[in-house]
Image (spheres, rainbow, N blue to C red):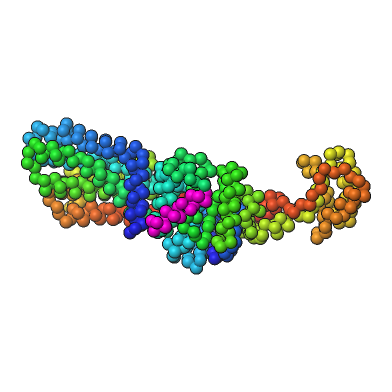
Amino acid sequence: MIEIQNLTKQFGHLRAVDDLSFSVGAGEVLGFLGPNGAGKSTTMKLLCGFLTPDSGSIRVCGHDVVNEPLQAKQRIGYLPEGAPSYPEMTVGQFLKFIADIRGLKPADGKQKADEVIARLQLESVVLQPIETLSKGFKRRVGLAQAIMHDPEVLILDEPTDGLDPNQKHQVRELINSMSSEKIIIISTHILEEVNAVCNRAIIIAHGRILADDTPASLEARSAYHNAVTLRFADAAKRDVARTAIGALPEVASTSIGDDGRLTAFPKEGASLLATVTRLATENNWQMDELALESGRLDEVFRTITSAGEAQS
Amino acid sequence: MNIVTTIFRRELASYFATPLAYVFILIFVALSGVFTFYFGGFYPRGQADLEPFFGFHPWLYLFLVPPISMRLWAEERKSGSIELLMTLPVTTWQAVLGKFFAAWAFVGVALGLTFPMWLTANYLGNPDNGVILAAYIGSFLMAGAFLAIGACLSAATRNQVIAFIITAVVCFIFLMAGSPFVLAAFRAWAPQDLVDAVASLGFITHFTSISKGVIDLRDLVYFGAMMVFWLTANTIVLDLKKAD
């Protein structure tokens, strides 16, 4: 359990984290979203005890991060932004160092190191100095370091940054495989990642929480939620269809996207799919595609963060 | 204590993972020889002792310790690994001590490798080996004081060049504090107590008495206190500004 209460951190004139309060329980995978400079990394650094808050409190598994830093840090695995490590060490030496510092017994540490090496597919680079590794490998070494002592809390600052699609997939699988028993907090600006691994998302900007919800409910806030999108090969037929759909009582508005697709937005709470499908069959429209939108997270993200912008 | 040892071992190994260690040791040993034989007049003196050898140590440390100490924290800041280190279950003190002892041990290795000088003196005559041992201890303590200053100043910046220059300047001030030149400048206006205080802060005063074989508790306390003071300052600097 992580409990954050009225957390505030100021850098000079900039209030990076502004009266932030939330708590996260076991089994939750929390995605931390926000524009650059929103305070995501600062919040994570505060959580891990790297920065000291100006006011407010953070408790990790019952231990106050400021007053009992060692107990709290023992329960946290942290991947800092950019996955820093000691470049001149080999992967094996580095993991051994982390195991020693984490207080694992030599035999235990060896076993844990072998486990994470296998889990993150680092076998081929164990003897290589970290500075010679590619960005993807460095990131995975950082992840290996963070999960090695099987922490109750995992805090990952942009864990998939710099990875190729296959590696991203692997890391997401890894996170999913650990999610049931741990508390995991991930910061990211890749929105698809939120859908892939998180069961809760917090959007912050200017150090304040703008939204705190499940990814599905966030998507539901989108204007595209339950909208129906159609694609026609022929633009003239599309315009005919647009007029017909626009006349339906459930439809609030219609639009043509940049890609030429026609999207019909429903009125509050209305459902369009059945009606539109019937209309299409009756008129025998030649469509290439007909899709029900669940909502677009990037659009919700933009709406929420730009509204926050306007407020401040 | 286990954690200090772990950090100590990692740091010490990191010196030897790069050419830095070998370059440093080579230059340290070579220069100390050059100073002793050419500038110290080791042969013409006709005495079997190592006074000319140890006499140059303060000046050797003045420009060879800053390159060792400058990377201690500035590099961690620059690469961001400080964020990793300080979020591991490690106290600031443990990190400061582990790093400091590693740097000190490393300079100790370099100092130990000057043993051919000792062999030479023993081959040529019958030096007082007790005095030589005392001088080695004094030199090692002085290196520790230099390193403690450097470690603290390295923690204050992420730029290694700045750390180097400021460390060299501060060490120079401490070296010169006991010199007749500085004391004369103080004597002109300051009360005798202040002149004595400044004189007692000088590295050379304390080092010279040890290197003559006089192990006075006050000199040991002086170097010990210097290290404690600067390492405490190092810890405070880190706690105040870990992130920037």
Q: Is residue A229 visible in the rendered structure shown here?
A: yes
- Which of these two is toward me, B240 or A128? A128
At x 15%, y 54%, the residue is: B216
Tell me, yes or no, whether the highlighted magenta stretch contains residue A239. no
Q: Residue furthest bottom?
A: A62
Quick one: A196 or B181, which is closer to the camera?
A196
Q: Percent from the top left, x then y, of residue A70?
A: 43, 62
Instruction: Say how many tags the image has.
Output: 0
Q: Nearer the viewer, residue B128 or B165?
A: B128
Provide the residue span drawn in magenta. A105-120
The answer to whether any part of residue B63 appears in the image is no
Query: Magenta residues: mostly which secondary structure?
Result: helix
- At x 42%, y 57%, the residue is A108
Q: In the rendered view of the protein, which quadrant contains the N terminus of chain B?
A: bottom left
Residue drawn at x 43%, y 50% as measured from the top left: A95
On the rendered structure, is A280 left or right of A188? right
Q: Is residue B36 left or right of residue B231?
A: left
- State whether residue B167 is above or below residue A112: above
> With B4 as the anchor, is A142 left or right in this view?
right
Q: Position of residue B139 (x, y in %)?
A: 20, 46
Q: Nearer the viewer, residue A158 or B76?
A: A158
Instruction: Say left or right for B69 vs A277.
Output: left
> x%, y% of residue A166?
60, 44
Residue at x 85% of width, y 55% of height: A274
Counting from the top left corner in percent of width and height, residue B239 is at 41, 56
